Amino acid sequence: MYEKLVALNDYWAKEGAGRQVLDQGSRYYGGVADAENGIAWPSHGGSPMVMALWAAALINKDSMFHHDEELASRLELGTHFMLRSQHADGTISPGWTNMHSPPDTAFVVVGLAQVYELLQAVEWEPLRKSTANIKRFLEQTVPALLTGGCHTPNHRWVLTSALGYLHKLTGRAELKERAEAWLAEGLDCTEDGEWTERSNGIYNAVSDVMLFHAAELLDKPELLEPIRRNLKMMAYMIHPNGEVVTDYSGRQDFGHSYTMESYFLVSRLMAQKDQDPTFEAIAELAGQALEHPGWLPNNAILGYLLRPELREIAIQPAELPTKYRIVMNRNFPRERYLSEMDAAGHGGKIYHSRMHPDFGAPVARERDGNTSLTVMAETSSMFALRHGDARLLAVQIGSSFEPGYVKMNDLMVEEESYKLTAVESKGYYGPVAKENLPLSAKSAISPWYLLPHQLRETTHLQYHHVEAELRKTGHGWQLQVSCAEPDSMMTQIVFVFGGEGSFTGEGLTPLEDAHFWKHGNVRYAAGEDWIEVDGGAHEHLVKTLRNTAIPGGCQTLIVNLMTPYYKTFDIRLSPLKADAEAANPLSTTDHEELMK
């Protein structure tokens, strides 16, 4: 693996050098231009990420760029760019998202602190100025990280890790105290290993690797426990082709394709620390997917160079499960936590982020060789199915009640089926009582936004109650969806398939970016594999209901219904030759051992 990392690092170090801005008249002089937008950013996925690749190559005797003076000169230019990009308050601004951002600065600190550790241990004159500049940059971030806040749950652990690195660099006790203040909020990971943002593609791995650094820097081994739980959970969040389950994410990885590569470094570190075969199996799978050493705070080559013992791991990896049925967060007391939200006093409002009330919602996973099923609550899709090369990415219920996609609130698991229910309520609001009216109500103009709307009495409260049952059959699955109330309301059931396949069947009316599915059977085929469904309907003419959207790059079937409805869809799957070869049964005992 080490040899692969060296080769990847050399490739991307050279590629990044080709994007460095060398026009001395440019405001971005010395930075590395983004391949998509042409701007050199000082953020952890921008210029400093490439600088880390250069630094790793320059100090590594196994690199083709070891002690390459031209590359050393480029690194020095990059450090000057970072110092110019640093604001007077010590922060940086990735202009595509957050301005004067403590958490984005913290991402950079965690990475550049590791780069500094590598460089300061090397006695080579061409690196001295770069080493000094990086140290200066890091020291200048101290005021911002001592006072700065965050937006999202994972930002807290990024800030904690960065404060730990700055404490190691400067010895200033108040940095450790600030880290302790973030940790005092408590860790946001369920017993089954789910982080708040439910982001298997991106932010799980961020929380994991940041808390690993924090555990070492702050001498807090207890911070490793949620990492262990999350990695064990991730063993069940992998599709047959190695992609990560992102069907229910609460962040921008929702519905997008990711591999396990971002888990490589932390799973290898945990495998080495715990001598755990499952963690080593995850590391091997993630390593096979690696096409880049990683963004700055999660750079695998930095990890290997700082910890040479990672090259010598001799743990025999376990077999990752390929046949199982498991429910994550089944016993998580989510209702109790939600019932306590009012007492928190925030009124359900949070700025520049979201509350994530879906945290801890149940997620069911089934896998049988090359067939992979996800059933989930509290997201815009009920379930997703992979069958060989055929991908049913989402099944969604759109309604004009709220309006928008219906999120199933509850998931019950039975022996051969899954039952999901959703209840939405919507009412009207009476006049504000006279004694609660503001003074503005008596003035010549009474603005709507000055009225205490929270004090209005609710009237004519209405409910939208949807039930769905997904039942296993001899040929695949049967989906039953029903809604008894309210009457005469437009509904859509949407089947979203992968864009690589194609439809055949009767009852299809092509649209610009989807199909009305009016009746009959439809077969979606990709390669030699197929998923066939029947049960189309067309009871109204609307293409998209308000607050719903047809995803781009996909093949979508739209079934139009009016309430009340009781609709059945049969889902048939093609035979899979590869299943016999891929079978790797996992008994209940094996599962219990893995989740310990």
Image: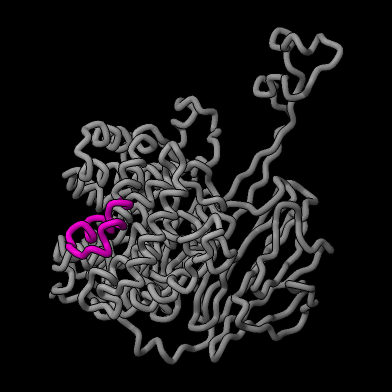
The image quadrant of residue 167 is top left
Residue at image x 76%, y 83%? 506
Question: Image height check: is 383 above or below 355?
Answer: below
Residue at (60, 55) in percent of width and height: 467
Picture residue at 28% right of the left edge, 52% below the top: 132
| Residue at (74, 31) in percent of width and height | 428
* SS majority, magenta: helix
Going by the image, does 158 lie left or right of 40? left
- The span shown in magenta is 114-134
If the image is split into quadrants, where does the N terminus sit? bottom left
Residue 66 is situated, as x and y percent measured from the top left of the image, at 25, 75
Q: 222 and 483: which one is in front?
A: 222
Q: Is residue 512 left or right of residue 342?
A: right
Q: Is residue 97 above or below residue 115?
A: above
Residue 220 image point, x, y percent: 18, 44
Residue 123 painted magenta: yes
